[in-house]
Image (cartoon, helix red, strand yellow):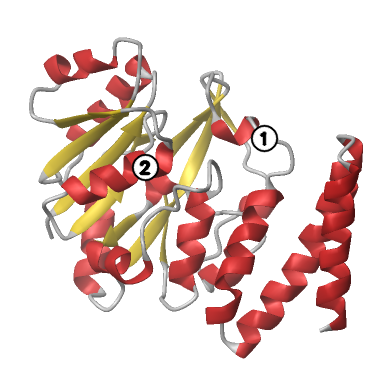
Amino acid sequence: MNISVVIPTYNRYTLLKRAIASVYAQTYLPKEVIVVDDGSDDATQKIQKDFPDIVYIYQKNSGVSAARNRGIFAAKHEWIAFLDSDDTWHENKLHEQQDFHQNNPEVLISYTDEIWIRNSKEIKIPKKFKKIGKDAFLENISYCNIAPSSVCLHKSLLDKYGLFDTNLEVCEDYDLWLRIALKEKIALIDKKLINKYAGHENQLSFKHWGMDRFRVQTLEKILPDASALQKRDIKAMLVQKYKLLSKGALKYDKKQESILYQKRVDTLELM
């Protein structure tokens, strides 16, 4: 099982070194490590000297989706593992996924459980983010519960269902996993095999009000391709999110957006 690792990064030179070190510490080593520098203006280019074996690609700042997609295009091998430059892997992460896929060749994508760390201390993960691993579609329809840094997938899935949506500045992972989960089994490796770090600058998840604005775009997009049961669940979730967004828009003095979301609620409830 030959694996290419794709690491997008932007102005995270110190954190990037930590991330790459965790890749080279794996008990099952990947065949290549691709770092896509999304227009950094810090010392990120020095990473080529720190790790001479990596494939380093620089691009004009275009967003994390474009950076991941650039890495996917450059990947030479059939399996791809993603790693965000502010996260790290435990040393047996790739070994566990390699072992799983060797024993379950019909499953083409897996993810793992995780540890959350803030200010150098492990923090308790909220109950709603507990990994279940039964139905990835239902378990991720409300919010993304699959960390990109935990995912290993076969490249054929990206050929079939598409790449990360560059029109989404955030929730691009939610979008891709749901598109895949609509038709494919996504398996959970029920072990804590990555560290997710919080509390540093430039985290996109802290940048926007109403993150559900981006999630509803995905739900609206996948609705036509869903089964009858999946359509029922998607519509119910859309109504829930539209109502929340309508109320949230008023708090930000966005009256027209509030009216728009309420109209969408009314439309779906009549269907």
Front residue of 9/165: it is 165
Residue at x 17% of width, y 43% of height: 27
Left or right of 118: which side holds 39?
left
Mark 1 highlights which residue?
A: 208
Residue 266: image location, x then y, percent = 89, 71
- Sequence order check: which comes first, mark 1 or mark 2? 2
The residue carrying pointer 1 sits among few (fewer than 14), some (14 to 19) or many (20 or more) residues within 10 Å by Cα, namely few
Residue at x 58% of width, y 61% of height: 218
Front residue of 145/116: it is 145
- The reply to whether residue 22 is visible in this rendering is no
Q: In which quadrant of the rendered view does residue 154 lie?
A: bottom left
Mark 2 highlights which residue?
A: 66
Residue at x 81% of width, y 66% of height: 264
The single residue placed furthest to the bottom in the displayed view is 228
Left or right of 73: which side holds 220?
right
Q: From mark 1 to mark 2, how far is it between C-alphas? A: 19 Å
- The reply to whether residue 208 is visible in this rendering is yes
Front residue of 45/261: it is 261
Question: Quick one: quadrant of the C terminus?
Answer: bottom right
The single residue placed furthest to the top in the displayed view is 43
Q: Amino acid at mark 1?
A: His
In this rendering, the answer to whether 147 lies above or below 10 is: below
Front residue of 252/189: it is 252
Which disc is residue 41 wearing? none
Residue 233: image location, x then y, percent = 69, 77
Q: Amino acid at mark 2?
A: Ala
Question: Quick one: quadrant of the N terminus?
Answer: bottom left
Tag 2's secondary structure? helix
Which-is-in-front pick, marks 1 and 2?
2
